[in-house]
Structure formats: C-alpha cells, structure tokens
Image (cartoon, grey):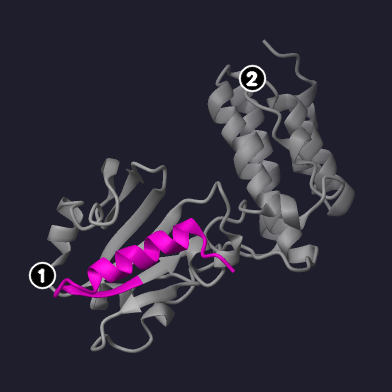
Amino acid sequence: MPVHPMLRRLDDLAAHLATRGDAVALLGVGSAGVDHDRLDAHSDLDFFVVVADGAKPGYLDSVDWLAAVCPVAYSFANDRNGRKALYADGVFVEYAVFTVDELARLPFTGARVVWQHADAPAGLAECGPPPPGPPYDTVEFHLNEALTNLYVGLHRELRGEQLTASRFVQSYAVDRVIDLLRLTEPVGAHRRDPFDPSRRVERAYPPEVLPLAAMVPGYRGNRAAARVVLDWLAARFPVDPVIGDAVRRLLDVPPG
C-alpha cells in the first residue's frame, strides 16, 4: 500500500533529524498520529520535535532544518513553542518543539513515534495526561449553559451586536448541544477529538439528530438559530420554565 505523501514528508524529516546531534525524537500527532488513516487531501501535518536541552531556540528561530527536505515558502511563529509553515509543494505543517521534560508535562493523546534516537527515553508518545473535561461535565450543566448562552446572545442581537450574538447562539450554545449528545447519544466508530469536540461531528450525528445547518445559519441568522436550538433542547431535556420563557420572550421581541 503506497505511503501517504504527508507520512512520507514526516519520514523524510525523521531521516534528516537523525543526522543532527541535538534531536531526540519526532512524534506525529493529530491525523499524523496513531489515527493516521484519517489523513486525506485536506489534512495538515501536525508533529512534535523533541530536542536536547538548550537546542530548542535554534529549532524555533530557524526553519533551515524544516527546509532540508523541501523548500519552505511561508512560515510564522504561532506559539512560543512552535510555528506554522507552508512548503513550496503545498504541504501545510503545524509543529511544536519541546525538550523531554517539557513533553512529559504536556497534555496530549494519540501521538505516534515516527523516529527517536537510540538513547531517547522510553514512552515519549505516552507522556502527558489527556486534557481535563469541563468543570461540570453533566447534562444539567451543558443544558443550562446552552440556555443562558441563548439568553445572552439574543440580548446582544437586540442591542445590534450581531457578531458577538452569533458566537453565543451559533457557537457557544451549539458546543453545549454537542456535549449533551456526547453524554446522552452513543455513537459507533466516531473518534472524538478530545481537544475540539466539533471535529468530525457530522460523521457522528446525522442531520435529523444534530441539525447543524439550522443551528448555524450564519451572521444574520441568530434569531432563527436560537429558536432551533431552544426547540431542540426542549424536545429532549427538562428546560427550566423560567429561563425557557425568558428566551422565548426575547425571540418574540421585534428586531430593532
């Protein structure tokens, strides 16, 4: 079976890093990690470079090591630990550089060792606990967060603040809807992203279960979206009548 071009790029990087005396390991993460069967034509390439103490600044400040396998057309520092870059052949990468001690304190999951130095410590890909869940990961919490997101968002809509309203109604409240589904609707082979629950959610829930097109109609659709989300919540969970009626009254206020 042919190797995916993204994985081949990682293998080429690994071969180059193996020639450097200050590299410890290369880990594929995200869709380049253990679940690399998810890679497709729209994937970017995420990886960690593990380096010796004192070597990190050189890997962050220069992309010479990155360009050793293909010219780099564009890059910028997007984090104190890493960069994003676009290779000249169209491969987009996002990477971070850590020492062994830093990696051990980092929360991550699903990493895959692409290469490691013979003297590298064992268990590099298993370092770090998974990210903690929300402080109150319960149906009651997510339900009431969604309802109050709608309430605040509709007030901002009536004030004329449509952008922030769209975030409350079509983003924050919908995030809580997804959490409610996670807690109450079992899914089959869906591989949930622990860092971003919105990833691959369309594969997990069909439109009749999660009507995203109606919940996220766009900048001018806040009121319609709020009505859909409220109806969805009320059909599945015991909505407190006080906050439910408060949201419905806001929906009945004519837009200014």
Residue 250 within the magenta-colored segment of the rendering: no
**Visible in this render: residue 247?**
no
Tell me the quadrant of the picture where the C terminus can be found: top right
- Residue 111 lies left or right of residue 145; in this view the side is left
Residue 165 image position (x, y, % from top left): 59, 29
Camera-side residue of 65 and 46: 65
User: Which structural element holds mark 1?
Assistant: loop
- Relative vertical location of residue 255 with respect to residue 23 in this rendering, above or below: above
Seen at 75% across and 14% down, the residue is: 254
Kind of residue indicated by mark 1 = Gly
Tell me which segment is drawn in magenta: 1-26
Numbered badge on residue 2: none
Residue 81 image position (x, y, % from top left): 26, 58
User: Which structural element holds mark 2?
Assistant: helix
Q: Residues within 10 Å of mark 1 (few under 14, many from 20)?
A: few
Seen at 42% across and 67% down, the residue is: 28
Q: What residue would you read off at disc 2? A: 158
Residue 85 image position (x, y, % from top left): 32, 46
Q: Earlier in the sequence, mark 2 or mark 1?
A: 1
Seen at 87% across and 46% down, the residue is: 208
Residue 25 within the magenta-colored segment of the rendering: yes
User: What is the CA distance from the residue labelled 2 to the residue labelled 1?
Assistant: 54 Å
- Residue 143 lies left or right of residue 155; in this view the side is right
Q: What residue would you read off at disc 1? A: 54
- Relative vertical location of residue 194 with respect to residue 256 in this rendering, above or below: below
**Visible in this render: residue 209?**
yes
Tell me the quadrant of the picture where the N terminus can be found: bottom right
- Relative vertical location of residue 37 with respect to residue 68 in this rendering, above or below: below
